[in-house]
Image (tube, rainbow, N blue to C red):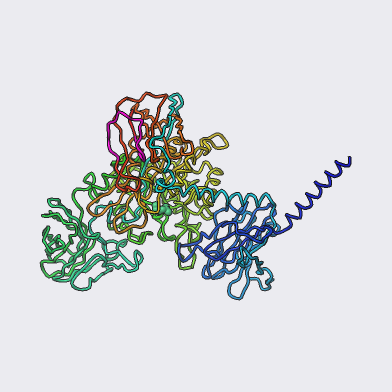
Amino acid sequence: MQTLFRLLLLIATAMVSRASLAQQDSIFIYSPNERQGLHAAALDSSGWHHLGQLCSSDYGTWGAEKRMYHPSLCRAKDGSWRLVFQVNDRSPLLAAAYSRDLVTWRPQDYPLVATPNCLKPVVQPIDNGFNIYYKSGDSAHRLFASSDFRQFSKSMPMPLADESLWQRQTAMVDGQRMEGQKFAIADQELAHIKDFFAQRAEDGRLSSERMHDDSRNLASLPQTLSATLHVDMNNQKPISDQLIGIFFEDISYAADGGLYAELIQNRDFEYSAKDRREWTATTAWQSRRPIEIATDNPLHPNNPHYALLWPNDTLWNEGWDGIAVEAGQKYDFSMYVLGGGQKQTFSIQLIGSDGTLLASSQLKTKGTDWKQYATVLTAKATEKKARLAIIPQKAAHVGVDMISLFPQETFKNRKNGLRKDLAQVIADLKPKFVRFPGGCMSHGQGLDNIYHWQHTIGSLQERKPDFNIWNYHQTRGLGFYEYFLFCEDIGAEPLPVLAAGVPCQNSVANAQGIGGQQGGIPMEEMPAYIDELCNLIDWANADPATNEWARRRAEAGHPAPFNLKYLGIGNEDIIGTVFEERYEMIARALRERHPEIKVCGTVGPFHTPSADYLEGWEFTRRHPELQYMTDEHYYESTGWFLHHRDYYDNYPRQNVDGTPATKVYLGEWAASTHVKRPNLETALAEALYLTDVERNGDIVEMTSYAPMLCKDGHHNWDPDMIYFSNTDVRTTPAYEVQRLFSVYGGDRYVSSQLTLERPELKHRVGASLVADSKTGKKYLKLVNALPSTLQLSVSGITLPPTAACEQLVGNGIEDQKAKAEVITTNSLTTLPPYSIRVVAL
Ligand code: AHR
């Protein structure tokens, strides 16, 4: 009895001390400075110690913004957290965020306030939500937030504000005095937070693994390692036959100056400082006197600027870093002329960098109104940096616009077509789909720069040029009609991705000082935006006899439908309330008006456990009916890919109601090292990951490496899959991997088990067997990312003693030029160090 009493006393004491522990401040939340976001420190017997970063500001553009001032946190009755902070001292908004556990956060919202700025916001719980107090100038203001922290009232001035609201606590964190807030949290909550940081650190450690360091870390590995591959032919599952496609964005001069074969830069005189600070309507043009630009009586209101050519004056165009021409090739020249009524003759010439005349032709014009004239130039010699000259032969004073020069040889010889060599290299990938026009270019730099597909069709002069978020210009000569034709030409499904009613979250502030998503397209304009998206479907698929948009497609030369099946809505947006409201409106309308279209949603720019990824998938699971698949993006280190090979293994295959789960579109991904160029190391990491993607091809529907194209001297982003100049195209090991997995894709996955003699290195080897039920072919892919030869013994399938296969080995893991080669081998299962092998069975 006495023992029992003692035990009860002990438990009671423990409970009291636990309760008092929970009363005692155990976590300190603070921001070391505005660039570093929100941090936590924990208390131990020696004082406060830094734990890690909880979150950071996602507001506005990189560089000037992404700052967090004066964070204020409070706890709701259910234990969840609310955070507000100031983003700068010039925007009429604050940042608001929600967390259940302090370490994972819902994406930030940026509610607007009625004052020109919003300083030192403070949040406090009240019965049915939260009060937020802030300062603007000398006055204090208040607004109300709903308990889910998604709805915010208008802000009102507060004549009598209690100044103690703005008092902060301080703590010495690892010897440094910080301002912030202290909270008492339960032991298990603190343990969860510590656990999170420990896992993050471990993940960081694993992700820093580099094959580059193998000579040091794996020096003791034997020259040959053995492994067994057991194939279970009886265990197969259907997988997507659309797994490998391409991501096309006009980034790094991928379109204008790149794939789009136009050789004249600024052909429409529409360059301006909006494109790039130093650019004007005459950029890329030269003359002996200042070029006069006119805007009265333009060729088309969407292209208001044109040049006035004075008597005896020559107009030169430098092309895109010069005009590359090839001996014997023919080039279509055309221009619109606004004449004074008299006959004119122009000499149209291509001049080499040393002044040599490479091609010449006469262009005769007559007329008073805008009219297009054309001639053909044949190059006498090959030259990398020619210039175009337009030389009036008689005294002329005319307006000129839309001055164009195209090689006659374009991909599939299409007019207004694509560069043949580049397009062919892309076609050789045999991509199953083409995503376009971006990337960030789809959602644009601010509301006014959202990509409107209908501005990119019709005659070239009626298309609306715009600035490019990547700091140059979009002519839209490569517009939706050309994208769809290209898809058709290469047998790929078109996958247009358009904005979800919000621009890029990294947008600079508009005239009202509102940056980031800028509040999204105003709600009253959303119905028109939704119509615009539906019009695209009609333009692509409807009958020209009954539909106005389809009639425009037919007029452009394509009466048959394009058979559009997929439509992406949103590009790695902040999955905040502004996004979710608009996405839902769009997706519901598409479902109602075009149930035949497979809608693709988005879950932000990063993988788990980023705020957008978590909220994006939560939204997706809440509304499975609103998307067929969703777009994931992650650019990561080779080590990350090596250590996350099970990423998709546990994705649910079904929704709670038993319907098939939303599929994954891994829309932007690439492995990189500090070298920032694809090499054999990144290729091996990508190949390994793709063997895992194939294993998960029942939930992963599509993938596309990004970005695809990059022109020398115009890099917005590295690494890229294909680098090019005006005259050459250089594929990379990343290209080889994409090609191997695309060309040798299947629609059934055959289960297999790979076991390595050294199990701790199993993340460095991969195998995948797929079957194509249409052809009956099977493709076995084997990846050895180890510095040792891999000796495989295979069971469950009979491999031929001698076989032809494609093999990517290269010259060491730093090799940036490695190409796969067809070899015939009688040791199919002996894989050289750092190699990828694909065999057709
Ligand atoms: O692929 C380059 C860019 O990366 C894309 O435009 C954007 O979506 C992502 O951040």
Tell me residue 420's x, y (percent).
23, 47
Tell me residue 5's x, y (percent).
86, 43
Position of residue 513 relative to residue 262, above or below, is below
User: Which quarter of the figure has residue 283?
Assistant: bottom left
Report the residue that reaches farthest toward the bottom.
138
Q: Residue at x 62, y 57 (%)?
A: 82
Q: In the image, which residues are magenta?
A: 820-837
> On the rendered structure, is 42 left or right of 596?
right
Query: Magenta stretch containing residue 821, yes or no?
Result: yes
Q: Is residue 534 visible?
A: no
Question: In the image shown, does 281 or 307 lie closer to the viewer?
Answer: 281
Q: Could you tell me which quadrant the N terminus lies in?
A: top right
Question: In the image shown, does 61 or 47 lie closer to the viewer?
Answer: 47
Tell me residue 826's x, y (percent).
30, 28
Q: Residue at x 58, y 75 (%)?
A: 137
Question: In the image shown, does 118 or 452 lie closer to the viewer?
Answer: 118
> On the rendered structure, is 818 left or right of 767?
left
Q: Could you tell me which quadrant the C terminus lies in?
A: top left
Question: In the image shown, does 587 or 808 lie closer to the viewer?
Answer: 808
Tell me residue 551's x, y (percent).
32, 46
Report the residue that reaches farthest toward the right.
1
> On the rendered structure, is 53 left or right of 807?
right
User: Which quarter of the figure has residue 288?
Assistant: bottom left
Position of residue 370 relative to residue 332, above or below, is below
Query: Magenta stretch containing residue 408, yes or no?
Result: no
Q: Is residue 71 visible?
A: yes
> On the rendered structure, is 507 left or right of 820?
right
